[in-house]
Image (cartoon, rainbow, N blue to C red):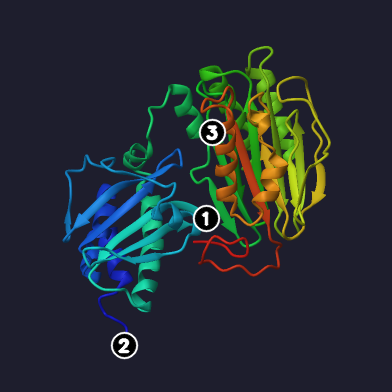
Amino acid sequence: MPDERLDLRGLLAAVESAPPLDAVDVLATELGKMLDATEVSLLIANLSGSAVVRMSHVAEHELQGDGHNERVESVPLEGSVHGEVLVSQELQVRRRGDGDWHALVPVTERGDAIGILELSLPQSPDAETIEYLTSAAHALAYVIIAARRHTDLFEWAQRDVPFSLAAEIQRRLLPSSYTVEGGPFTLAGWLEPAANVGGDTFDYSVDREYLYVSITDAMGHSNDAALLATLTVGSLRNSRRSSAAPADQADAANQALLDAARPHQFVTGHVLRVRLADGTVEIVDAGHPAPYLLRDGTAKELAILGGLPLGVAPGPYQADRFELRPGDRLLLVTDGFLERNAVDVSIVDALEGSADRHPRQVVRELSGRVLEASGGELRDDATVVCLDWFGADTPRGATGGASRGRATT
């Protein structure tokens, strides 16, 4: 007989009646009561991807703290069980020295690894409890996504360093989730900012027919680059939301820059879309570094039709076309990966050596290598987008780990 305490509807009903700022704490409190957990915490991933921050902590069904403790504890990911859980996207249960059982459950929605649900349980969870925990963590992901639209609390907890104005503008230009998974694809992006923000962005959107992707690099640094990037991304989104093809998006952005940017300002980039039915790619190159394709274990630069950077001269732009095959991995980078110190990082070798890893891992590892090669201080932003193509007819579930063969929740 199912345990009547494990009532997911009741859990969500309690959350829905709570104010947005209290939703996570209410969920943790109710979950603790249902499972007799002595402690329940949400740890949310910080913006640098190096740690998880204990944002909510309920002990013996009582909230610990006064609402100002969202950054009271930061848990490094490297070499920790928390890092293992985020990478593997698999629940872990371990016996602790005090006799309690320690459960760590990934909080993830469509590939976006938001954080970890951590519980102390009086006994080892059975199969039904584990299934319930997995569902509760999935529900928690949606609670966080809904609640953070109304507050800066989650953003504040995730920030481990102060932002400049340029960095604030740049962050607002990025998608709210850096990873997305659908049936035929998985996409992840990452931006490693320079000490003086360099104007990089990436963006994506999925509709019924296409996956749209862009990666751009506005010339210059600081506020000038951020404002130039704002004009570019705003134009690309405006035309994309009218279902414009990549060439038309590029034409509109180019004209916007010619009309409004200062002389000699320009933006490089790739604008593309992938037809979900068959993997056909239309891509516009605007003076940007070549994309890379990993196919059958071998990576190479793709030779595509080139064009001038946006804002240099009147169009029109032309799109090149190629076909993605099931198992292909497409990688887009900005020239931060080609700077003098960064060239020590071989993108081809990195791609071939990480073929079995999730795009979310690939983009962070590659960015980390560039940061290390640059001595921890980039001269220019380094931005990367990784797209895995599985094929329209590949069955992929909505739950499960981070393997390349199935989608994650």
Q: Mark 2 = which residue?
A: 1
Whole-number angstrom distance, CA of label 3 to CA of label 2: 50 Å
Disc 1 secondary structure class: loop
Q: Which residue is mark 3?
A: 192
- Extreme residue toward the bottom, this view: 1
Name the residue type under label 3: Glu
**Which quadrant of the rendered structure holds the N terminus?**
bottom left
Q: Earlier in the sequence, mark 1 or mark 2?
A: 2
Amino acid type of the residue that numbered disc 2 sits on in the rendered structure: Met
Label 2 SS: loop
Q: Is residue 319 left or right of residue 189?
A: right
Q: Residue 379's x, y, as percent?
A: 58, 22
Q: Which mark is residue 111?
A: 1
Tell me if mark 2 has few (under 14), some (14-19) or many (20+) residues whose alpha carbon lies within 10 angstroms of its own.
Answer: few
**Dot 3 and dot 2 residues touching (CB under 8 Å):** no
Q: Which residue occupies the foreground of this view, 354 or 171?
A: 354
Q: Is residue 226 visible?
A: yes
